[in-house]
Image (cartoon, helix red, strand yellow):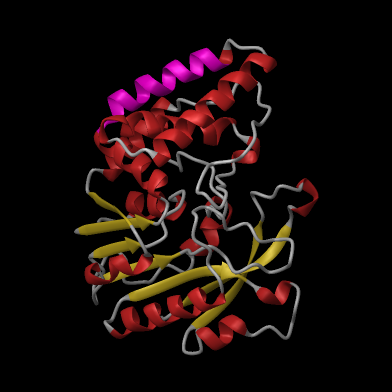
Amino acid sequence: MKPFVKWAGGKKQLLNEIRENYPLELGGSIKKYCEPFVGGGAVLFDIISKYKFEEVLINDINKELINTYSQIKSNLKSLLKELETMQNTYWDLNIDERKVYYYEKRDRFNYLKVNANLDLECEKAALFIFLNKTCFNGLFRVNSKGLFNVPMGVYKKPLICDNENLVEVSLALQNVKIITGEYDTCADFIDKDTFVYIDPPYRPISKTSSFTSYSEISFDDDKHKALGDFADRMSKLGAKILISNSDPKNYNDEDDFFENVYINYNITRVNAKRSINSNGSGRGSIKELLIRNY
């Protein structure tokens, strides 16, 4: 089982290091699991495949992403049918025809994004996956109006309908509560028996590295400080907290931003590879932070 979309900031490359920092109480006194920024779900799928929880809650501010999780959980048969149709159609087209088809689907997705219709949520989820598999570099990026604006990528036979994996994901999500909103929407769920993995939009480590437009809402330094306050409140309840973020010291040894925000936490630096970058030469090994209260 793996993430059903490619996602900027996805943790597939960092899973081994994150696993090494899971709290020892997993499988014991920890009964609940929460992800306030679920994203592509690499850590979610890893952890719920290895440990049993009484309750699991995932959240993300990206409504289209969360709708897709919900459709995979509750409406898989219809979703697979839509994806299979799009895949078969797309594979049969030449490059010029694919461009026309792609931009028609992008326009349709944006129309459904703006004009919410509960009867068309399955179609919107299928379009979300289609665009993720066929757009440039698997990016999800929106403009200031909230419209998806990534151009088409060039792939010979992209796997748009990954039937086997989607079936596994659907089964895994059956006991997962799925919500959308700000991260602090999760506060009422979290208690002393909860492990919380927090993976927010990263703080940019250089002037050219900012890629945080997964939603129409930016995540600046003030929001990172507010997130630190949220982590402190959840920590006081007794929850185990693990947080991922960028390491400003990649570019500036004097930047102690996270040491100041998480002054009472353990901070570990780990090697990570950039998996999504619009400039291929910008992909490489850098340090990232794992911040924990245990």
Pick the residue in front: 261 or 287.
261
| Quadrant (top left, top right, bottom left, bottom right) of the N terminus | top left
In the picture as drawn, the residue positioned furthest to the top comes out as 92
In the picture as drawn, the residue positioned furthest to the right comes out as 281
Residue 167, by quadrant, is top left
When the figure is inspected, residue 242 is found, relative to residue 65, above or below; the finding is below
Residue at position x 38%, y 78% in the image: 230
Q: Main secondary structure of the magenta part?
A: helix
When the figure is inspected, residue 9 is found, relative to residue 200, above or below; the finding is above
When the figure is inspected, residue 23 is found, relative to residue 143, above or below; the finding is below
Residue 53 shows in the view: no
Q: Is residue 89 magenta?
A: yes
In the picture as drawn, the residue positioned furthest to the left comes out as 54
Residue 147 screen position, x and y as percent: 52, 43
Residue at position x 74%, y 55% in the image: 284
Residue 82, by quadrant, is top left
| Quadrant (top left, top right, bottom left, bottom right) of the C terminus | bottom left
Q: Is residue 121 magenta?
A: no
Residue 185 screen position, x and y as percent: 30, 66
Residue 208 shows in the view: yes
Residue 169, by quadrant, is top left
> In the rendered structure, which segment of residues is drawn in magenta?
75-90
Residue at position x 34%, y 27% in the image: 79
When the figure is inspected, residue 136 is found, relative to residue 198, above or below; the finding is above
Residue 152 screen position, x and y as percent: 64, 31
Q: For the image shown, how many numbered marks are present on the structure?
A: 0
Residue 189 placement, left or right of 262: left
